[in-house]
Image (spheres, rainbow, N blue to C red):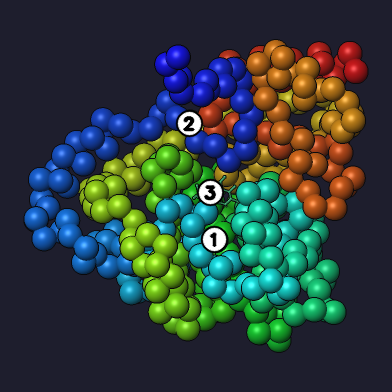
Amino acid sequence: TVAEPPARFQGIDFRPSFPALEHIPFKKWKETAIAAYTNTHSGDFGYDEDPAGNWQLRTNICQVLLHTKGIRCLPSQVIITAGATQAIAMLSRLLLKPGDAVAIEDPNATFIQHIFESTGADIIPVPVDEHGLRVDDMPTHRRPKCVFVTPSHQFPLGSILSIGRRIQLIDYARQTGCYIIEDDYDSEFRYAGMPVHALRELDSERIVYIGTFSKNLFPALRIGYMVVPHELLDPLLRLKKLLDMHCPILPQITLARFITERHLEHHIARMKRIYSKRRKCLIAGLSNIFGNRVKISGDAAGLHLVAEMAESFCGSQVVAQLEELHIKVYPAERYTIVKGRYENQLIMGFGNVGEINILEGIKAIESVLRQC
Ligand SMILES: Cc1ncc(COP(=O)(O)O)c(C=O)c1O
């Protein structure tokens, strides 16, 4: 028998935090790659690359961070990683050993929780509300080695960590001596309110800031980065070298050029308009079809929002029935550690769903819920 690649899901997928794959700027990327490859030297292809990654890419990241987030950092503090995933995996390996404690938001991105669990550390779930992490509920009986937060757009509930809680969290980290891991995965897509500054501004030596190109370009690129406190720089570089020496050079030099030539900036501006329309369409569609039976939140930034319905998604066949209709939905409860707090909420990604499909999907959700 001839082996076949696994079939991809064909249908309407409300997967949160997923970019529009049909709008990936391939033509520009291809032209940029050709120009970038043409400018290489044979010496660039040996074993001597910096584990921190391509210098020009790290320089460009510093400039982008300064202009968009108010982050002041040097290229020497930036490490290029295989997505935010590798940055989180490296930090958890460096900072945690079995029996240590790590405080993480509850709910959270399950794959990130699994990374922390894989170290053998104890996970301390900290609840989240409309102002982000509830810092009052941080553990007092144990000192975590690190705290994981998504302050610019909580994953998955979408709240933004308030300034009061930011200060409170820094105080907590200083008092307990723990590091804060700030995962800023999608906040360049902001639709309402003032731009959100990075938490790292408040303490660059206690916070590791993580960014990714998975949402503003595409996930399979596998390029992310972290801006690290001085104390962690050498151990993280040693670890990066141990794991994979450095990220592949050709995508890095292409991306560096893509940023230098301002294609990334233009792509983000274009995508912001597209996502803004999809977000509006989802909000209007939910309101039209569910009326006052739906409450929307977490929609100020990113590629997903939260729809709270009158009905529960737990224990019912809603998800399975919709999947039979080729529609994938994501109940908030699948992202929780402590169960039972978000049974009526759906996390709805609109990044990779066109407007016609958004409306079709909402109608199907309503009709399945009506029959339950
Ligand atoms: C909370 C969160 N952080 C980071 C990422 C991005 O990970 P990566 O850069 O490895 O693609 C995701 C992707 O879904 C996410 O949900």
Dot 1 amino acid type:
Ala
Q: Is mark 1 within 8 Å of ligand 1?
A: no
Reading the image, the residue beneath label 3 is 186
Up-down relation of residue 252 to residue 342 (above or below): below
Compare marks 1 and 2 and give the one earlier in the sequence.
2
Secondary structure, mark 2, is loop
Up-down relation of residue 57 to residue 22 (above or below): below
Q: Is mark 3 within 8 Å of ligand 1?
A: yes
> 289 and 330: which one is in front?
330
* Residue 73 placement: quadrant: bottom left
Reading the image, the residue beneath label 1 is 89
> 293 and 82: which one is in front?
82
Q: Is residue 89 left or right of residue 306?
A: left
Using the rendered image of the protein, determine whether residue 344 is visible from the camera's viewpoint: yes
Secondary structure, mark 1, is helix
Reading the image, the residue beneath label 2 is 20
The structure residue drawn at horizontal position 75% and vertical position 80%, both measured from the top left corner, is: 143
